[in-house]
Amino acid sequence: MSEIAIRHAAVEDAAALYRMLSQPETYADTLQIPHPSLQLTQERLQNFQPGTQRLVACIDQQVVGDLYLEVNNRARRRHTATFGLCVDYHFRGRGVASALMREMISLCDNWLNVERIELTVFADNEVAVGLYQRFGFETEGRARRFAMRNGKLVDALYMARFRPPVNE
């Protein structure tokens, strides 16, 4: 199996990200809607907001995963961050999401001074919930009828992970 390389996203990754976000298996598990815009994907890669990181996972130079991390810029919430993650449908089950999670947690714990990483995930996405639990995330609540997906309202879980105490 080829090695997974993690790097910061570049404008040149827009077509690969657009392809991933266009997959029904991808947008069904996110808050994206079908038929994403290539232009919007390009604009998001060109105009990073302060406090954001966009990582991509590559196998043999091909972009196969994406993670968007946003550190909260509000004065009383600067210790928190949230993120979104997606993996190309054809590369799932190969450790791509885990590689992105490890790098994101390292950034938060060791470089960005983030104490609390938050996320929202569809409650029926057992694979994602299991991934997050393996990385120390705990469910803090459930949002009933959170979002529309394929004509039905589905629940979401609020999960969070706290940075472990540093032993000095």
Image (cartoon, rainbow, N blue to C red):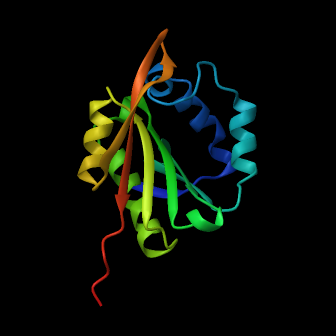
Q: Quadrant of residue 50?
A: bottom right
Q: Is residue 69 left or right of residue 118?
A: right
Residue 134 point in image, percent of width and height: 24, 51
Q: Is residue 91 above or below residue 45?
A: above
Q: How many marks?
A: 0
The residue shown at (34%, 30%) is: 123
Q: Is residue 115 above or below residue 132?
A: below
Q: Which residue is situated farthest in the bottom direction here?
A: 168
The residue shown at (57%, 28%) is: 32
Decide which of 142, 4 is in the foreground and name it.
142
Q: Is residue 21 above or below residue 64?
A: above
The residue shown at (65%, 62%) is: 73
The image quadrant where one finds the C terminus is bottom left
Residue 112 can be seen in this image: yes
Q: Is residue 159 left or right of residue 6?
A: left
Residue 53 point in image, percent of width and height: 58, 58
Q: Which residue is situated farthest in the top direction here?
A: 151
Residue 60 can be seen in this image: no
Residue 164 point in image, percent of width and height: 30, 71
Residue 143 point in image, percent of width and height: 42, 31
Decide which of 157, 110 is in the foreground and name it.
157
